[in-house]
Image (cartoon, grey):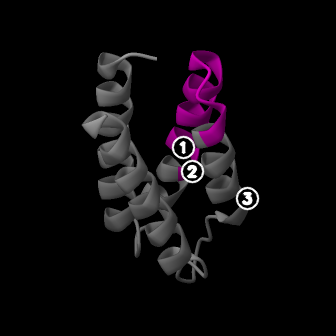
Amino acid sequence: MDREDWLRIQKELDRLYELHESGVSNPGKCREFNSQVSLFLEKLEESGASNFADRVMDILAGCSPKEFSPCDNRLSTKGALERLKDQIRDKLKM
């Protein structure tokens, strides 16, 4: 993968992070986040970024949108997204 690929991944990850934060108390956005992360996972797998795809799969495993209660794993998901963002930044520094 080249620098442009990593920049695209970084941009998408930033968008997903913002979507996650805005969906904390909004079940519709929470479901949208789950759906968008699934699509992101597919793109990562297709591009050969399997290490990152594995981490995104872990995020999805803990993500279960609920209708009438707050997310149980919000802080865990937020932390996982932040760690992924840091790893992408490190890749871009190389």
Looking at the rendering, which quadrant does residue 73 occupy?
bottom right
Residue hosting label 3: 61
Residue hosting label 1: 37
Q: Amino acid at mark 1?
A: Val
Q: Is residue 68 left or right of residue 79?
A: right
Q: Residue at x 69, y 66 (%)?
A: 62
> How would you rate the neighbour count of disc 3 (Cα within 10 Å): few for under 14, some for 14-19, many for 20 or more?
few
Q: Considering depth in this image, is 6 or 62 the residue closer to the camera?
A: 6
Residue, far front: 94
Q: CA distance from mark 1 to mark 3?
A: 11 Å
Residue hosting label 2: 34
Which element is circle 1 on?
Answer: helix
Q: Is residue 75 left or right of residue 18?
A: right
**Above or below: residue 3 compared with residue 52:** above
Q: Residue at x 54, y 43 (%)?
A: 37
Q: CB under 8 Å between callouts 1 and 2? A: yes
Residue 94 image offset from top left, x and y in percent: 31, 34
Residue 11 image offset from top left, x and y in percent: 28, 36
Q: Considering depth in this image, is 73 or 8 the residue closer to the camera?
A: 8
Q: Is residue 13 left or right of residue 68?
A: left
Q: Residue at x 31, y 64 (%)?
A: 22
Residue 52 image offset from top left, x and y in percent: 58, 41
Q: Amino acid at mark 2?
A: Asn
The residue mark sitting in front, 1 or 2, is 1
Looking at the rendering, which quadrant does residue 18 occupy?
bottom left
> How would you rate the neighbour count of disc 2 (Cα within 10 Å): few for under 14, some for 14-19, many for 20 or more?
many
The residue mark sitting in front, 2 or 3, is 3
Which element is circle 2 on?
Answer: helix
Magenta-colored span: 34-51
Q: Residue at x 38, y 16 (%)?
A: 2
Q: Considering depth in this image, is 91 or 13 the residue closer to the camera?
A: 91
Q: CA distance from mark 1 to mark 2?
A: 5 Å
